[in-house]
Amino acid sequence: MSQIKIPILDLKPQYLAIKDEIQLAINQVLESGQFILGPTVQAFETSAAAYLGVKHAIGVNSGTDALLIGLRALGVGPGDEVITTPFSFFATAESISMVGAKPVFVDIRPDTFNIDPDLIEAAITSKTRAIMPVHLYGNPAAMAQIMQIAAKHDLKVIEDCAQAFGGIYKGDCSGCEQSCDDGIRDRILGKYTGTIGDIGAFSFFPTKNLGAYGDGGLITTNDDHIAETARMLRVHGAKERYKNLMLGYNSRLDAMQAAILQVKLRHIDTWNSKRRWVAQTYSQLLAAVDGLITPTLSEGHVFHQYTVRILGGKRDLTKQTLADAGIGAMIYYPIPQDKLPVYLGQYPDLSVNNQLSQEVLSLPMWPELSLEQLKYVTTHLKQALPQ
């Protein structure tokens, strides 16, 4: 089999398919002369809120700012604690630290890569103000259990949806020991990620399922007061110009990015469906391969990443072997947040978190991947694994 190049992500096929729509949207913004917030951003916010089924959608500069402003809007600040997962991009914990609070890390589940709800209550103290689950790789976290715990202890919930636009909570609670209140589960079944907790925080970094052509983010909420506070915080803490009520940020979504996102929003269901097909095909081609564990194909998962586990300490060698065959694969994440230099020595070891950081390997993933490409990837992956 001759070598072909398959990167971890290729955005060009998507762009070519919607090129005319994108060019029209960009030209309309250029002709309008309004480039920061304004009607184009408002139109996207309205469309995003309608798609997700949430009352408020507030465009901001990035997914990191969505988390930061979201925490501020919830009143989280110095002296508070926020329970979250150690297995995520640094922006998750960084946003907590940046508002003066302390991230409290709870171990993850090996089958979902998400925070283990059975371990959350033991981490709650008198200083705990919120829980921040991450829907990692596009897989919805165990929100029924999380919302039940939050209600019991009067805690806020902010969902990190950076990798999960279009993800849907389907109530797959397999493997959990925490019993759920049926009323809570029934109320949130079928809801999109980002609409279940008090706040949802989305990233539109170009690599995301719904990605801009630059930075961008979104805050979602059904709470009017939270929405009003978030809108003020994104424009220097002001309702009206020159009447600043609090210390805020310059975190406004550009109209150009909003216009691009408005176009892409029309296609997100198709793209997410194709991602699920790619994931299902990968899993079929990799079924019963020794030394490898494929991800759970749970309902509602939108597969921002297709992440396998390479066992036996062979992950890094496997990654290099794939690279030699022209296949891009990435490690998300080689160093968990609690082990990063900024936090080093401040937290006890978390066994599953530590183990998975040495095993995970994300394979090429984008909606337009062909069966031929998937066969090439999986053939070389199987050849790379020790026999």
Image: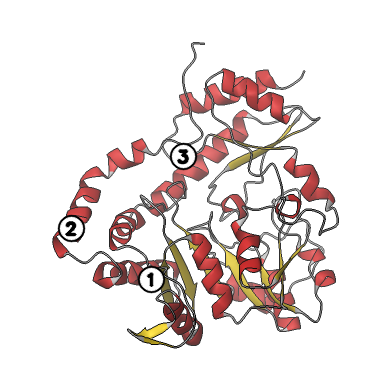
Name which quarter of the figure residue 172 lies in.
bottom right
- Label 2: how many residues lie within 10 Å, few (<14), some (14-19) or many (20+)? few
Q: Position of residue 136 (x, y in %)?
A: 62, 53
Image depth: mark 2 or mark 1 in front:
2
Q: Amino acid at mark 1?
A: Ala
- Label 3: how many residues lie within 10 Å, few (<14), some (14-19) or many (20+)? many
Q: Nearer the viewer, residue 121 or 105?
A: 105
Q: Is residue 134 visible?
A: no
Tell me whether the residue at label 2 lies in contact with that at label 1, contact meaning CB atoms closer than 8 angstroms: no
Q: Position of residue 50 (x, y in %)?
A: 38, 71
Q: Which residue is mark 2?
A: 30
Q: Which residue is mark 1?
A: 50
Quarter of the figure that contains the C terminus: top right
Q: How many marks?
A: 3
Q: Is residue 223 visible?
A: yes
Q: Nearer the viewer, residue 133 or 269?
A: 133
Left or right: where does residue 42 sit relative to residue 165?
A: left
